[in-house]
Amino acid sequence: MSSEETTTVTVCPASELGVGERLIFEHGGEPIAVFNAGGELFAIEDRCSHDDGPLAEGEWNPADCTVECPRHGSLFDLRTGKPKTLPAFQPVRTFPVEIIDDKITLEV
Amino acid sequence: MPSAEALAEKKKVEGINSDYEEKFGFHDPETGYAYKAPKGLNREIVEEISRYKDEPQWMRDFRLKALEQFQSRPTPQWGGDLDQIDFDDIHYFVRASEKNSRDWSEVPEDIKNTFDRLGIPEAERKFLAGVGAQYESEVVYHQVNEQLEAQGVIFTDMDTALREHEDLVKEYWATVIPPNDNKLAALNSAVWSGGSFVYVPAGVKVEMPLQAYFRINTENMGQFERTLIIAEEGSDVHYIEGCTAPVYSSDSLHSAVVEIVAKKDARVRYTTVQNWSQNVFNLVTKRAVAHEGATMEWVDCNLGSKLTMKYPSIYLLGERAHGEILSIAFAGDGQHQDAGGKIIHGAPKTTSSIFSKSISKDGGRSTYRGLLEVADGATETRSKVVCDALLLDEDSRSDTYPTIRIDENDADIGHEATVSKVGDDMLFYLQSRGLSEEEASKMIVNGFIEPVTKELPMEYAVELNRLIELQMEGSIG
């Protein structure tokens, strides 16, 4: 997949994703998750790099900016997409996210 | 005419054949125990273990979260039959002695006698750089060579490490094996106790092995030690563990977690000679990460237990890292050895090998289960997997489940597997050279496992050969 071409995606009004909440949606068949950690937004692909299963529905910690894969426990850093523990060792994709006109907007 | 030496060796071997029960299978009275948790697992037990050990809050939280994960995960339905384990019929924490001693004379008499019979202090005097002895849930004795200590090497039990080196432990704790990795890792994370902590500073080479010995004494006991080894840049260490338990009519559970971090150009070898009695479920998660230029070796010998499920794994995450797994499994009557290894090539120019040898006799079942993975981006990797099975009779069984996943085109991967039987012609040939049928059979088996035994320190190679000879007794005719 080329990382050069990006699309701007409008997800939802900013008011719909409160502090400590997460939202999982699909764009072009690819599941993406947006997290609101203390007012700061992070977006990652919703796929664990260990076994390709869903990642974002796992337990997440807004204070540490991490999400734990619900199947084998790999802990991912939401800021970088990098795993902090095995068994995953490859990063997942992250997407720039900002609020434009009161809407959560991603560059995918 | 056999030489005097051969006769002496034969006598020795026959002496060992006085069976497991006598040599390892004895048990001591449980008098004078400091604490024994009631059977069963719940939040109160986990909190009590943590309180008893006076742990920091983060560890208490870690345990409780792991307990929830253990309870919510289904029991694995692959490998051996784990539905036989009654998790409510287990003592999860048994403290035999109030203190962990550095002086052998301070160890309680009964426990000391046990380890004397197993030869632990003797081994320490002879050739070890450090030794730890775990009895039930906790380590009762720990000693490390003073010179190594002066070089900054830490070799202590995990409970002490958490008290004295909390920051270091916390930095690496559960980063290699998170609690939710699998159900048994979650169980260990909830109720862990004892195990070893090894820290080798950069550039320090520990010439002699460090050894830990694990002993279960109580019936229906669960032993859940947790070992963490950190080898800093350019360091070198060899850690050896041995395990035995008494023979009981009901089952015990051993479920350890072993995490190893081998940093740039470090070398770690981890040798196990597991000889649990045949009423122990041995379900262990062992995983190592090898960074740039590091070498990680697992030498894993599985002789005892009712069911062993153990697949030491190595994540090769730095360029030119190298991993080796040597595995022996011996399955006798009523035993299932489900063993193997996993190697994940996660960086370019990494190399690895897995050599697995299994022997099945008297209806025993051995399984090789392995994974070799070459991840996307791990170019120019090389690996060789060899799994050989030897069946000693018609009733025994051997299965091989090798999985190979390759995401790079230029990987150089070899896989060989053989299954052989000790045939009449082989026995006849050796017998025609003057050996008895039993001697011939032992010789074939010893030749079969020789690639692994030659990698062990001499004392362990001799012990392993004898244990196998012991298992072999009466296997012919």
Image (cartoon, rainbow, N blue to C red):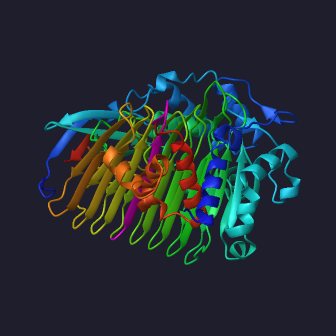
Residue A70 location, x and y as percent?
A: 40, 35
Residue A38, compared with residue B5, is above or below; it is above
Residue B250 lies in what quarter of the image? top right
Q: Judge left or right: residue B82 versus residue B155.
A: left
Q: Judge left or right: residue B108 versus residue B236.
A: right
Residue A14 location, x and y as percent?
A: 31, 36
- The residue lying at 39 percent from left, 72 percent from top is B293
Q: Is residue B226 visible?
A: yes
Residue B272, compared with residue B400, is above or below; it is below
Q: Is residue B9 magenta?
A: no
Of residue A3 and residue A71, the one placed in the foreground of this image is A71
- The residue lying at 62 percent from left, 71 percent from top is B208
Find the magenta span and give its range: B320-336
Q: Judge left or right: residue A6 versus residue B153.
A: left
Report the residue that reaches farthest toward the front.
B1
Of residue B239 and residue B68, the one placed in the foreground of this image is B239
